[in-house]
Amino acid sequence: MIKQERMVVTNQQEIAHHIFELTVQGELTGEMKAPGQFVHVRVADSFEPLLRRPISVASIDFESNQFTMIYRAEGRGTTLLSEKKAGDTVDILGPLGNGFPVEQAKQKAYLIGGGIGVPPLYELAKELNAKGIETVHILGFESKGAVFYEDKFRALGDTHIATVDGSHGTQGFVTHILNELPKDFDTYYSCGPTPMLEAVQWAYPEKQGFLSYEQRMGCGIGACFACVCRTTKSETDYIKVCSDGPVFPAGVVIS
Ligand SMILES: Cc1cc2nc3c(=O)[nH]c(=O)nc-3n(C[C@H](O)[C@H](O)[C@H](O)COP(=O)(O)OP(=O)(O)OC[C@H]3O[C@@H](n4cnc5c(N)ncnc54)[C@H](O)[C@@H]3O)c2cc1C
Ligand code: FES
């Protein structure tokens, strides 16, 4: 069930350049169903900025009723959010959308992420590992200073890093790493910039894949049509990324 709750900040820290890890506590956590779901965050108590910011759930701890988000503070809203301290409260609406289908992987999965698309793959990796699925993580960032959670992913499986400027790991994009890796997996999951999702789909036309799309949002609950995309089904068929997605099987969304 979707809830709106003033959740309590239990921790906030900068874990890479302009990248913040924010953990909050409250009953809304208990409603989360799948990795890849997101929440809609009211970044300030003032009238402005009015629109909530969509942020993915990066990690869930049901025992302590806490979940963690990882976000890049770049615009006005996320910069305001980065000023929250432990003990403050944040107005959160969620959980929203449909996440990654964990049950679809059989033995081995590739998790492919780019930039701020990496966070939801962490909870996904945890849940797949808990089910005995081997995960390989292929993660792309701008530069060494923007890399986060490398050790946490390594603790869960084979992890490969690409940076655009070559300051860490392989120079280039995740696709440079994919070209070198065997195709011995049954399912891939991906989240990141749309051109990256397109490239991943092209790389594995024969594999089962699930992609998480990012789209500008208004309501976040399927009521305003701000986030519609066309689909491959027909000229007139549309989906709403917020409520039908953000995760879709490969080959469904025309981006
Ligand atoms: C389903 C989903 C999950 C996301 N998960 C994460 C995450 O885990 N970590 C993270 O850092 N970012 C994530 N994003 C992107 C994040 O929502 C934007 O970076 C953020 O809204 C920008 O807000 P701002 O205040 O920094 O920028 P501003 O420029 O002040 O934003 C102005 C308006 O544009 C919208 N907007 C700007 N950029 C984006 C964008 N890329 N996607 C959607 N709306 C945008 C804002 O929501 C706001 O309404 C996600 C987006 C979606 C749709
Ligand atoms: S954001 Fe309103 S319908 Fe998707």
Image (spheres, rainbow, N blue to C red):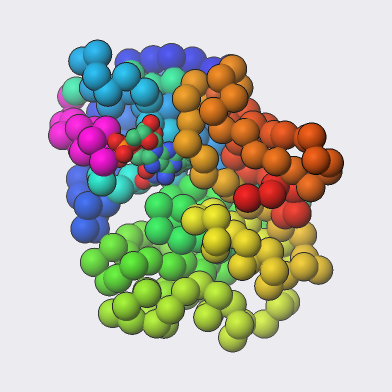
Which residue corresponds to the image point at 43% horizontal and 33% vertical from the top-left? Answer: 54
Q: Is residue 173 visible?
A: yes
In this view, the residue farthest toward the front is: 235
Task: From this view, report whether residue 72 is shown above or below residue 53.
Answer: below
Q: Position of residue 184 (x, y in %)?
A: 72, 77
Ligand 1, image quadrant it occupies: top left
Q: Is residue 106 visible?
A: no
Q: Position of residue 132 (x, y in %)?
A: 66, 58
Q: Position of residue 112 (x, y in %)?
A: 55, 63
Q: Which image quadrant for residue 32?
A: top right
Indicate whether residue 82 is drawn in magenta. Answer: yes
> Quadrant of the image for the N terminus?
top right
**Residue toward you, 75 or 36:** 75
Locate residue 101 relative to residue 142 in the image: left or right: right
Task: From this view, report whether residue 2 is shown above or below residue 38.
Answer: above
Q: Position of residue 250 (x, y in %)?
A: 72, 54
Task: From this view, report whether residue 144 is shown above or below residue 96.
Answer: below
Which residue corresponds to the image point at 50% horizontal and 72% vertical from the top-left? Answer: 174
**Residue toward you, 194 or 6:** 194
Locate residue 82 relative to residue 221 in the image: left or right: left
Q: Which residues are magenta?
A: 75-87
Which residue corresponds to the image point at 47% horizontal and 25% vertical from the top-left? Answer: 218
